Image: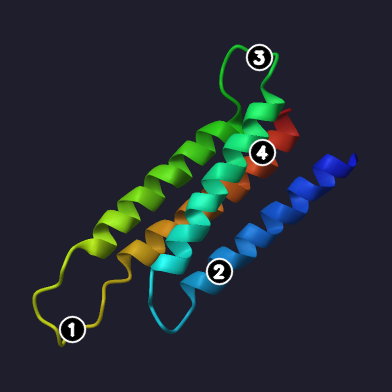
Amino acid sequence: MSLGALVVVVLAVGLLTSAVVLFRSSNGLPWPAIVVASLTSAVCFTVGGDSARGSSGPSVATVMGSAAGFLAVLAAILALVPKRPQQEPASRTPLALSSVGIALGALGLLLNLLTG
């Protein structure tokens, strides 16, 4: 196993761990998870772009990075929508979407190692 592959595995495990920690957080603020999902998308595009130089199509990491980025943007839009009743707790939907995006990106990194 090369050093680059080891770094990608450690990064993927760290991203999966952060997705679980952010989803289980008690404060319910979605913005830290949205930022991590955006960074996950950027890492997936970086790793996928480096691994797919000789191929004609996108790599698994690039496709999963685009899904993570889309979910991060969707979560940010949902987090900015104002709520009518102020007594209700904030929706956890943006937090869940961001956590799924982080997990998809991490799995895309691991699958990219297996297929590449």
> Circle 2 sits in a helix, a strand or a loop, which is it?
helix
CA separation, marks 3 and 1? 50 Å
Query: Which of the two marks, 2 or 3, is nearer to us in this view?
Result: 3
Give how far across and how far down residue 19 sits, in percent. Answer: 55, 64
Secondary structure state at the residue bearing disc 4: helix
Q: Is residue 4 visible?
A: yes
Image: 82 above or below 106: below
Q: What is the spatial separation of the Cα atoms under label 4 and label 2, in whole angstroms? A: 20 Å
**Mark 2 residue type:** Val
Using a 10 Å C-alpha cutoff, classify the residue at mark 2 as few (fewer than 14 neighbours), some (14 to 19) or many (20 or more).
some
CA distance separating discs 2 and 1? 24 Å
Crowdedness of circle 3 by 10 Å Cα count: few (<14), some, many (20+)? few
Q: Is residue 99 visible?
A: no
Identify residue for label 1: 88
In primary-sequence order, the first of circles 4 and 2 is 2
Residue 23, position as x, y percentages in the image: 47, 71
Q: Which residue is mark 2?
A: 20
Which badge, 3 or 1, is on the more N-terminal residue?
A: 3
Number of on-image labels: 4
Question: Left or right of 105: which side holds 8?
Answer: right
Q: Give the number of the mark in front: 4 or 1.
A: 1
Decide: is 51 above or below 97. Answer: above
